[in-house]
Amino acid sequence: MLARPSTTHFLRLCGWLVRVRIDFHGSPRPTLGVEWELALVDRETRDLAGVASAVIDTARGRMDDPKLLHAELLRNTVELVTGICDDVPHAMADLRTTYDAVAGAAGDHGVDLFGAGTHPFASWSTQQLSPGNRYEELINRTQWWGRQMLIWGVHVHVGLPEQSRVMPVLSSLLNYYPHLQALSASSPLWAGTDTGYASNRALMFQQLPTAGLPFQFDRWEEFEAFARDQLKTGVIDDLSEIRWDLRPASHLGTLENRICDGVSNFTELAALTSLMHCLVVDLDTRLAAGETLPVMPPWHVQENKWRTARYGLDAIIILDASSRERLVTDDLHDLLERLEPVARRLGCADELRSVADIPARGGSYQRQRAVAEATGGDLPAVVDSVVRELRDGLGPVGA
């Protein structure tokens, strides 16, 4: 039987039937916010541990701002968030402060923090939901696919000043979807199996009914019409239930980038955050100056997502509407060079330069596979390596 809209939904809908108005509360400057999902793993077994509530309670008692630490869908997950930040160093400092409190609290409860898109061997069927009707309703609706969502990611918000520019920037940012996915891919292993994908998370998450690639709208009013239809037909009860890989966060005045897999260390987190910050600011600046931003047809965007989910940093991607193709790492080199002046203005030049270290070192999915191969398929050893990256940091490039 199809799920029907709730009474609350109908009551709220009464004033929305003709037109949904969504006011984008623009940010006067290109602010930055980061949300970092981390799993909790047992120090002995290296399996997932559903002790998030206890860890959060302990950590919040040691934090100046407890609102910077959240529970998530599953009891094995914590989410570290920043406040409203001006630049990448500010955001990383925010996260470091929260991380220190959480890492200490995790140790008190016999667990470590783990940053990747998936866990190598945990069973999805044994995981427990966090308390709350919101999560119960999600699983009730999505059933088997919802219960499969044993995945973690990084979300980056960038402030935009004008409502009219949000959708064109979003559509053009999709041209760089494959770069971000290839760089962050960290989910090759799932339920004890090497999936053959660099980012299995990307293809799993899009199974939820409102997740995946966004529609490419030219005008804000088209997005409002889409939201009206979703509300009217009971697909969503709230705008936050639009779970696109890129989406407007109208109440925050940001464009939220949800492409990246979970990240296992601060160095790469800073690098990826700087790239996302620079891309959005560059596109918005060009649009404000009168430039028509380049976009690709949806079928090219969809193919790029699949190619980099499958092949990661070895993917040959489609560059434009003319169907030109290029190895993603070759195109990344030119992109970083072009964005360097933007990074200097935003105070993240060093972090942007370090993006090039990811393919030089090998992406997280490649590092995980290397450990699995070197240890004869010892998946707890893979978890050890990911935990160690977060705790001790990465070694030099080429090490």
Image (tube, helix red, strand yellow):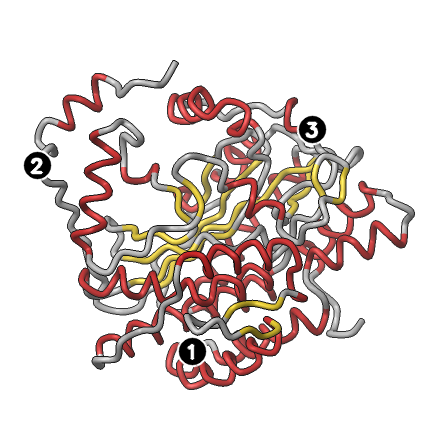
Nearer the observer: mark 1 or 2; the answer is 2
Which residue corresponds to the image point at 70% horizontal and 55% vertical from the top-left? 365
Identify the residue under disc 3: 123
Marks 1 and 2 sit apart, C-alpha to C-alpha, by: 45 Å
**357 left or right of 244 in image:** right
Which residue corresponds to the image point at 35% horizontal and 76% vertical from the top-left? 282
Marks 3 and 2 sit apart, C-alpha to C-alpha, by: 46 Å
Nearer the observer: mark 3 or 2; the answer is 2
Q: Which amino acid does label 1 sit on?
A: Gly
Which residue corresponds to the image point at 61% horizontal and 78% vertical from the top-left? 330
Identify the residue under disc 1: 347
Image position of 11 with respect to 289: above or below: above
Marks 3 and 1 sit apart, C-alpha to C-alpha, by: 42 Å
Q: Which amino acid does label 3 sit on?
A: Ser
Identify the residue under disc 2: 18
Q: Where is residue 116 in the image (x, y as percent from the top left)?
A: 63, 49
